[in-house]
Image (cartoon, helix red, strand yellow):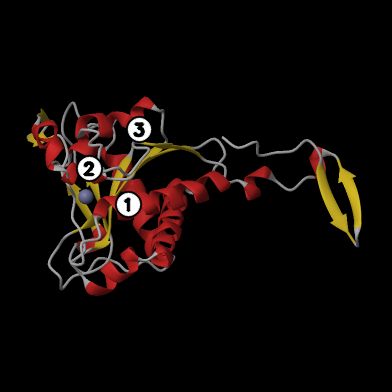
Amino acid sequence: MKAAIAAVAALVVGGLALSLPASAAPSPVADAPLVGMVIALDPGHQLGNSNPAHFDELAATHFNGHERKICNTSGTATNAGFPEATFTWNVALKVKEKLEALGADVRMTRHSNSWKKWGPCVNERGAFGTKVGADLMLSIHADGADSSGYGFYVMVPSVIKGWTDDISAKSIRLGKRFVSGMAGSGAPRSTYVSGQMMITPTISTLNFSDVPVILLESGNMRHSADAARMSSSAGQQQYADWIVAGLRAALRK
Ligand SMILES: [Zn+2]
């Protein structure tokens, strides 16, 4: 958490520095609309999930309320070999920086992008938002779909009794607002997922959550224009800006 509000605000008017009491300072809500919000950010797959040294750990399975799933996967890559793990890591750091500047308390499921590391397993990752008391958890991914399609979509949990019946409706509601916020700020909508939303029982990261959760497929790494944007620093900043707009819309902040 940042120290958001100084007791005294200094104004410079016509070259003169004036001190005003705190009551005359700009509204902290306008300056930092996300103060008090805890946002869990999951930068997707760890880079080392592709490392054969970790295959045994990653093969361990967990029941997710719907089916048994392996611990985690490698994720996808562009045709040029730029990995999803690195894309989501770079974007998540930029999202974190922007959210913190807006006053949010941001917690991350991983703290490195390392070939030597793996996981966390989906059960642990899915439970992370609950562990840190998040208002919302966002898991950032990129898709590896047919090269003809492009654009972003989200996945949210359908109702599984005893698992997601407490968070499905709210995740769908926040997910719809997230989609509107991202598209409204300019993010290309998915051309291959209707309404840019899949409501699904299959995703462990969603099913293990007890707080509202959204999994974002930022774009299609197999589509040339999406891949080019994802591979550049300026493009990653663009995704981060779109994601922050989506989160603010979801949280109505
Ligand atoms: Zn992924």
- Crowd rating for badge 3 (residues with CA inside 10 Å; few <14, some 14–19, many 20+): many
Q: Position of residue 10 (x, y in %)?
A: 83, 47
Q: Nearer the viewer, mark 2 or mark 3?
A: 2
Which one is earlier in the sequence, the residue at label 2 or at label 3? Answer: 2
Residue at image coords 20%, 63%: 194
Seen from the viewer's position, the closer of residues 34 and 45 is 45
Which one is earlier in the sequence, the residue at label 1 or at label 2? Answer: 2
Residue at image coords 25%, 37%: 117
Check disc 3 and give the amino acid type.
Answer: Gly
Q: Is residue 75 left or right of residue 151?
A: left
Q: Is residue 230 left or right of residue 37?
A: left
- Crowd rating for badge 2 (residues with CA inside 10 Å; few <14, some 14–19, many 20+): many
Dot 1 beta carbon under 8 Å from ligand 1: yes
Residue at image coords 22%, 63%: 221
Q: Nearer the viewer, mark 1 or mark 2?
A: 2
Q: Are marks 2 and 3 in contact (CB under 8 Å)?
A: no
Q: Are marks 1 and 2 in contact (CB under 8 Å)?
A: no
Check disc 2 and give the amino acid type.
Answer: Gly
Dot 2 beta carbon under 8 Å from ligand 1: no
Seen from the viewer's position, the closer of residues 89 and 212 is 89
Marking on residue 88: 1
Marking on residue 129: 3
Marking on residue 48: 2
Work out whether 200 lies above or below 188.
Answer: above
Q: Nearer the viewer, mark 1 or mark 3?
A: 1
